[in-house]
Image: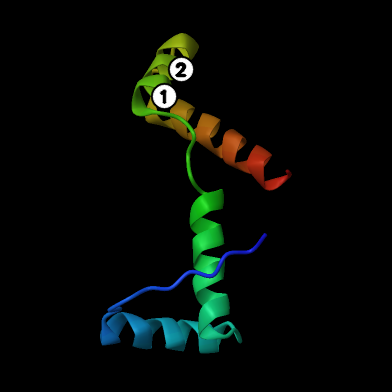
Amino acid sequence: MPVNLSIEDAPDRVVEKLRERAQRHRRTLQGEVLAILEAAIEGESSFAPAEVLAEVRRLDLRTPSEAADLIRADRDGRRGR
C-alpha cells in the first residue's frame, strides 16, 4: 500500500533545484522526488565493505582493471533484471 511522505523545512535552494529538475524531466515535483528515491534504492549495494574485500581476495584480483571488469559485469547483470 502506498505511503504519503513529507519533507519538512526543505531549504529553498533545494526545492528550486528540484523544481528545475522536475521541469526538465517533465514531472511534477513529487514525481521527481519519487524518481530520485527509486534510483537511489535501486543503486544501493547490498554488500558490506568487509564482504567486498573478502570477495576481492577470493577472486585474487590484483589490478584495478580486473576489479573494474568485475564491477561492470555485476552492474550490467543487474540492468537485465
**Mark 2 sits on what residue?**
55
Residue 17 lies, with reference to residue 67, above or below; the image says: below
Residue 1: x %, y % from top left: 67, 59
Could you tell whether 70 is left or right of 60 in the image?
right
Q: Three-letter amino acid code at disc 2?
A: Glu
**Mark 1 sits on what residue?**
52
Residue 9: x %, y % from top left: 27, 79
Name the one closer to the observer, 11 or 8.
Answer: 8
Q: Three-letter amino acid code at disc 1?
A: Val
Are circles 1 and 2 on residues that touch, CB within 8 Å?
A: yes
Quarter of the image that includes the C terminus = top right
Name the one closer to the observer, 12 or 75.
Answer: 12
Say which residue appears at 51% left-offset and 83% top-offset: 29
Say which residue appears at 57% left-offset and 85% top-offset: 28
Name the one closer to the observer, 13 or 52.
Answer: 13
Query: What number of labels is visible?
Result: 2
Say which residue appears at 32% left-offset and 76% top-offset: 8
Disc marking residue 44: none
Residue 47: x %, y % from top left: 45, 30
Could you tell whether 43 is left or right of 62 in the image?
right
